[in-house]
Image (cartoon, rainbow, N blue to C red):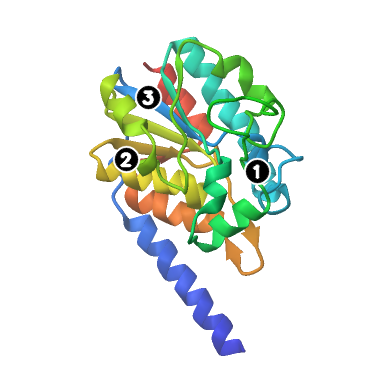
Amino acid sequence: MKNLVLTLVLVVSSVTNMLAQLPDPGFTVDENTAIVITDPQNDFLSPNGVTWGVVGESVTANNTVDNIEALFKIAKEKNITVFISPHYYYKHDHTWEFEGSLEVLMHKITMFDRKGALTVEEFEGSGADWLDNYKKYIDGENVIVTSPHKLYGPESNDLALQLRKHGYSKIILAGMSANLCTESHMRELVENGFEVSVVKDATAAAILPGINGYEAALVNFRMIASHVFTTEEVLAEINKK
């Protein structure tokens, strides 16, 4: 047992040292910069949401709800365009013939469910709806809501198209959930030639026995993104603009 503990300590220490030695390309906010927020929805961020039992600890520790709101607020003040990539499931999504582990779970707990793409019946206040704190910002003219992504990344929606059509090449990324949708958006945007930074405390993730999704995401944010900000740091960078 002692040998196992020693091995784990050495592995963690090695990873920490490796990350500390990685170059940090940095990220400067300019007129080509947009903010992208994934899944700012009740099922992730409200204590009444269906995932709160596993993400609530991380959301609370990171002050995620307030930090996302701080991004919405400064974007409105500075007229920075915000793109929201939401997650919705309709009736036809529940008849898929095969699914991954978390897809099965999300469908089972009716996460992000809506009556249909052409109706907002029962949408208000549902798990798929925006967190109330954010609605006053999302209604603003500087916010664009894309079509929904269905799994984790934006491959199935029009986020990349909308970003390009509006002339943006640089992304400040935040939202839920860190090691799933947020990380998948980061990876796809980077692969598509966007310069991406991540706001590490404007996201959070599930924490389960033996699985810490947030810690896993932090490693990949540091290794893939151009820069990893705290909310305080990115607000200061935006205020230089």
Q: Which corner quadrant of the image does residue 120 belong to?
A: top right
In front of the other: 87 or 81: 87
Circle 3 residues within 10 Å: few <14, some 14–19, many ≥20: many
Report the side of 37 relative to 124 (left or right): left
Cα–Cα gap, marks 1 and 3: 23 Å
Q: Position of residue 26 (x, y in %)?
A: 31, 37
Q: In the picture shown, does residue 197 fall above or below 50?
A: above
Q: Is residue 188 left or right of residue 53?
A: left
C-beta proximity under 8 Å, tags 1 and 2: no
Visible in this render: residue 226? Answer: no
Q: Nearer the viewer, mark 3 or mark 2?
A: 2
Question: At x 61% / y 52%, what residue is drawn?
Answer: 107
Which amino acid, mark 1? Val
Callout 1: SS = helix
Q: Which mark is on residue 34?
A: 3
Tell me the quarter of the image containing the C terminus: top left
**In the rendered image, which residue does mark 1 sit on?**
59
Taking depth in this image into account, of 148 and 202 the one nearest to the observer is: 148
